[in-house]
Each structure stands twice: as C-alpha cells, then as structure tokens.
Amino acid sequence: MDPRTAGLGQPAALRRHNLSSLLREVHVHGALSRSELASRTGLNRSTIGSLVAELASRRLVAERPPGDKAGPGRPSPLVAPLLDGPVVLAAEMATDSLAVAVVALGGTILHSARMARPRGMRSPDAEVTALGQLASGPLGALGGGQPVLAVAVAVPGLVRRDDGFVLLAPNLGWRNVPIADLVAAELALDVPVFVGNDADLATLAEHTRGAGVGQSDFLCLWGEAGIGAGIIAGGQQIGGSVGYAGEVGHMTVNPDGLPCHCGSRGCWETEAGEEALIRLAGGGPGGDARASVDQLLAAAAAGDPEALRAVTTVGHWLGIGIAGLVNVFNPGTIALGGLYARLFPFVRAIIVDEVAHRTIARPHDLVAIVRVSLGADAALVGAAELAFAPTIADPATVSRVGARRARPVAAMAALGGRAVEQSQGGELAAQRTA
C-alpha cells in the first residue's frame, strides 16, 4: 500500500486526501501538466483528470494550453492556480509598519498596501483599527466573484497557536492581547482569523518559495527592533509546545549586558539588534530608526570609521549567536532577513569567522549563510500560507460555482482543530479563533 494513503480506508477520506495532495502541488510549484501531477502524487491519469475537474469546479485551479511544444506527441495542458478565484487576506503588524495583501493560490500577491507606523508602545485597538482601514483598499479591489477564505496576521511576539492570543510583543508594548478576536471584529468578514509569529511565518514562506526550498534543515534569522528565528528541523517547522519557539533574540549572550525590553538583561537583541547598532554608531533612542540605519550603512560603505566599528561589533555578536544556533540545530542553510539582509555585505565575513571558531567540528563547513529571497514581503507570503492551510487540507470546503460556500474552518474540525499546511516536507500548525 502506498504509505501516503495508509489509513484512508473510506472513499470520501481518500478523495479528500487526493484533492489536497494535488492542490498542494499546484499551490507550491505552480503550473504543472497532468503527467507531472501523476508523477508527483502517484495517482493515475484518469484520477488526476477527475480531481482537476473538481478543483476547477470550485474555482481553485484552471487548465490552460501548454507553452512551446518540446517533443513528440500531444502536449498535455497545464493545471495552474486560478488567480481570479478564492483568496486570503494576509497582514503584518511590524514594529514600524502595517501591511496587508490579498493573495491568491500559488502565493501571488494581487493587491497590497503598506503604511509606516511609529516605533514603541502602540495601542492594540488603534493598530487593529488602522489595519482595518488599510485593508479596505486591497479588499475593495477584488472582483465580486472572489471570496475571502480566511485572514492571517503576522505579529512580532509570542503567539499562542490555539487561539491567536499574543502573550508578549515587547517591541510593541503588548501583553495578553487577543489579536485574532480583535481583527475578526474589525474586519467583520465572517471567516477564520489566524495569528502567527512573524519570524515563523516569514520562514515558512522562505522554505516554501525562497532561500530554503528543498532544505530539510533550514533556519531564518530576522532582525529589526528585535531578533526572531524560524526553524525547520527534519523537514518540520518547530513551534514548541504552545507556539513560542524561535524567540532567539532573548537568549542571554552577555550576562553583564544592558536591560532588554522583555525584562531580562544581556539578551542577544541588546547586543546585535537595531538599537544596539544605532547606539554603537553614536545615535540615541527615538527618532526614525530606519533612516538612522540607512545613514549608518551609507557611512559604512563610504569607509567612515565609527560606522564600520558599529557594524563590525554587531557582526561579532551576530556571529556568536549564529554559532550557537549552528551547534544546536546543524542547519544546511541559514538565511538572514530584515536588518541583517541589509547588513549582510558588511558582516558576512565576520559571521563566517565567528561560526568557524565557535562551532564543533565541521558544522561550519556544512552550513551556507545567505540572504533571504523574498525581502519585505516574506511575512505576508507566510501569513497567506497559514490562511490557505485549511483549504489545502480539505479543498471540498470551498463551494462549487453556484453553490453556497462552506467555511474553511470545517477542514480544521476534520483535523481535530488544527489545520496543517505542508510545504517541501515541512509543516506549520495553524492557529484558530476560539
């Protein structure tokens, strides 16, 4: 028996599994021929045809003529995600901005908007109101026949996976905030609202569509006001017992260091975060942090000694922390995003040197340290993956054309309340509203 279908004795369960497998292939890899789908899923051509027809009836995929014919025989049509079909709304609440995007299957961003927000303590209610106002533009640009299946929000903090409750977001000044409930009330879309840690979701996006494609052991490190990591180990995304894994910015690296926003002292982000970089270059707290970093990097590129010292010091602490992560997780690739993608040309050699001197035998020879591929949209793309998870787990929750639409939360109930989106062998547990 094919291990992929073991335990699926009921015809309905088997068909649901096959629909999910086929839709996931098209969602992750884009347009594929029926023969390619048969090879990837292990299903025969007639079954593929039936599944494609059902997915098309739910406006999830469409067949289109192939490109240039490349060989003998009749070319097979391509099965592709339908860009004018159902969509999700992805959002990111970052330390200095809000962003929203309407995203189609296949990860295509159809409409998006981003706005700057002040750094520091911000009211959750005010942020959610601003998010709702920002979302009105992308949502208003949708065609009338494009239902929104779900909403997912990326937040820089500790997110409880079961109900989208933010326990702590120190760089926003938030404690114990029911973000999923607040967003659901503000948007009033009558669809599930999921919430995830921004680094975890950005890592999911990079693993699915960016620097981590094909990697079973992959780590993304994201830096702005704080430091967060997303970790793929053995093909699975590590979330921890309740979803708080990856808060590496709060590892203690210098017991005699400065106080951290989290209440501890000497955290990694106090030595290698954005505030540390600006402070080392002679700047003070407050002001436009992004503009300050831009000026600092321009000065470093011009050879300014003070700017170079600041960058070198941050690179040193960054390398120390990365070496520890290499020793613990032994990833094949570490991708740096956010602030660290901008610093990368200045600090790569320093990081490599620290990793070489601080890791056990040979892991430093086996890890590639690179920049992320998706840039500023990574967290939004990852949030979209989270929002699409229930639909991909059970495509039959999307109604056929002309029928009443089923809510995708039914797919989560079928999986015991936790929908799982697999990508390149990895998985991420979806959060749901209570």
Image: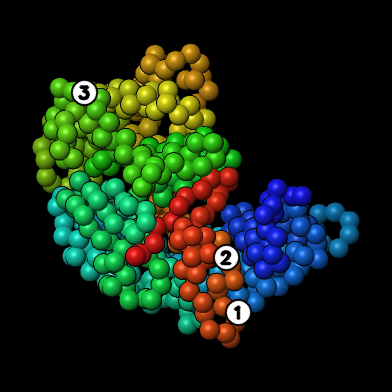
Nearer to the camera, 432 or 228: 432
Q: Which mark is residue 254?
A: 3
Q: What x and y, as percent, mark residue 145? A: 51, 81
Q: Which residue in the structure is indicated by mark 2?
A: 394
Q: Few, some or many C-alpha atoms within 10 Å of disc 3 (few <14, some 14-19, many ≥20)?
A: some
Judge the density around disc 2: few (<14), some (14-19), many (≥20) Cα neighbours within 10 Å: many
Residue 183 lies, in percent from the top left, at 29, 67
State the SS at label 1: loop
In the figure, 109 relative to 204: above or below?
Answer: below
Work out how far the residue at label 2 is from the one at label 3, CA to CA, in angstroms. Answer: 48 Å
Q: Residue at x 47, y 20 (%)?
A: 364
Q: Position of residue 115 (x, y in %)?
A: 27, 61
The amino acid beneath tag 2 is Asp
Residue type for callout 1: Arg
User: Image height check: is 127 above or below 289?
Assistant: below
Circle 3 sits in a helix, a strand or a loop, which is it? loop
Query: What is the three-letter code of the residue carrying label 3?
Result: Asn
Which quadrant holds residue 17? bottom right
